[in-house]
Amino acid sequence: MTLSPPSQPLEYQAKAAALPGARAALVLLLLINLFNYIDRPVLAAVEHDIAKDFFKDPNAPATMAKMGSLASAFFFSYMLTAPLFGFLADRMSRWLLVGTGVLLWSLATGATGLAGSFGILFASRLFVGIGEAGYGPSAPTIISDLYPVERRGGVLAWFYVAIPVGSALGYVIGGAVGGAMGWRWAFYVVTIPGILLGLWSLRMKDPKRGGADAPAGTADAQAKPTMRDYLSLLHIPSYVLNTAAMAAMTFAIGGIGYWMPRYLIDVRGLATAKANTMFGAIVVVAGLGATLLGGWAGDKLRPRFPGSYFLVSAVGILLACPFVILMLHVPFPFTWLALFGAVFFLFFNTGPSNTALANVTHPSVRASAFALNIFLIHLLGDVPSPTVLGYVAGKFGWDAAFGVVAALMAVAGVLWFIGTQYLAADTAAAPHRRAPAPA
């Protein structure tokens, strides 16, 4: 039986507009997210040059595994500390956490360029992850408290546009600056903008928790959540299935994002600058279009298909699978077309999947829900992905490595399809989901 979307009181329907200050907050968070994602692929863009500096044989399986561990170090500290910052974000100023986190990861990014040994390089990436964990759980909850559920999908899609755009800029900046001035300068140039954005964040004021949710969900949104509230997340089918699907998807994105420049350089014979520039251009065009289109489609289909956010996510990532395989076996210029298709459909789920996370959780625990999601998707996704795929590629070849990527993408699609039957009911129950206080 198809579940209908829950009806809202007339006074709430009239209220379905952004709260004061929403646009300024969205612009600032979008800029922060942009530089957040610029930092990550800069490492991938100059990874080959770093390997040449620190190792005698940059193509040895052991070397590739170690270079993959730099990305794993970032994601490991990111996912390990995200629950702590999510816990704090449910209890204190989220903008304070955002500003502090942005300042920390910006300074750590500059330290990456100063690293004189592989150990220091590894440690700097750990601190970048800690800084981003201070920002990650808070940002989407601030947006969710400023925009109503009817508009949340499209708005969060704009926020997550920073993923493809920032990633593309990271590859381009890393390739261009690294090629012209050395790999260390690729990290220096993104440090100052991050520091300025962090200082701007410290001047912002927190919105009221649950301020844009239905009235039934705002009465106790300001109360401190209990352990029972946190445990209730594990009893939300949409939340559990969505997190599992995002973990599989994150494994795929982590592998493709980190190793694609190396594949294009070593296997396809492209120059470093061209490989990063072309891949960056594909990511920005395909990723930007797919992220906005996916968010728009999820919102537009919601009145007709209550599970639309999961449906859009599932269809997109399943369509990406054949393009990943095709990319390995067609010559240029068709390789670029296949890669474009893979990136486009891979990013189609970004807005809908994160919107579903916000919609099925109560405002009082929303930051912790995002933090737990961050912890799990990175623990199972891009923490092991760069290291595992680096070893698989060195041992068995790139076909095997990208075959693993395609298989995990298919798993994500199946999980989202299963979740469509639960999403409407879980969204309707979210405003009432707080556990009753013990007698």
Image: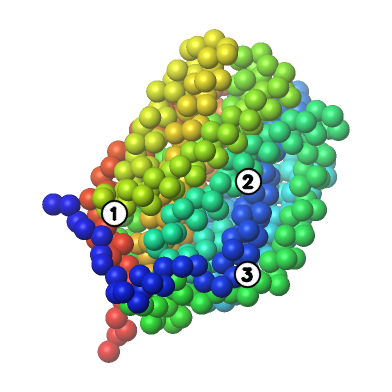
Looking at the image, which residue is at 34% across and 39% down? 314
Q: Nearer the viewer, mark 2 or mark 1?
A: 1
Q: Is residue 240 above or below residue 369?
A: above
Residue 113 location, x and y as percent? Answer: 80, 43
Q: On residue 95, which mark appears?
A: 3
Q: How many marks?
A: 3
The C terminus lies in quadrant: bottom left
Q: Say which residue label 1 marks.
A: 303
Residue 332 location, x and y as percent? Answer: 57, 12
Disc 2 marks a residue whose amino acid type is Tyr
Q: On residue 37, which mark appears?
A: 2
Q: Secondary structure at mark 1?
A: loop
**Label 2 neighbour load within 10 Å: few <14, some 14-19, many 20+:** many
Looking at the image, which residue is at 40% across and 27% down? 321
Query: Going by the image, does 268 lie left or right of 104?
Result: left
Front residue (pair 416, 436): 416
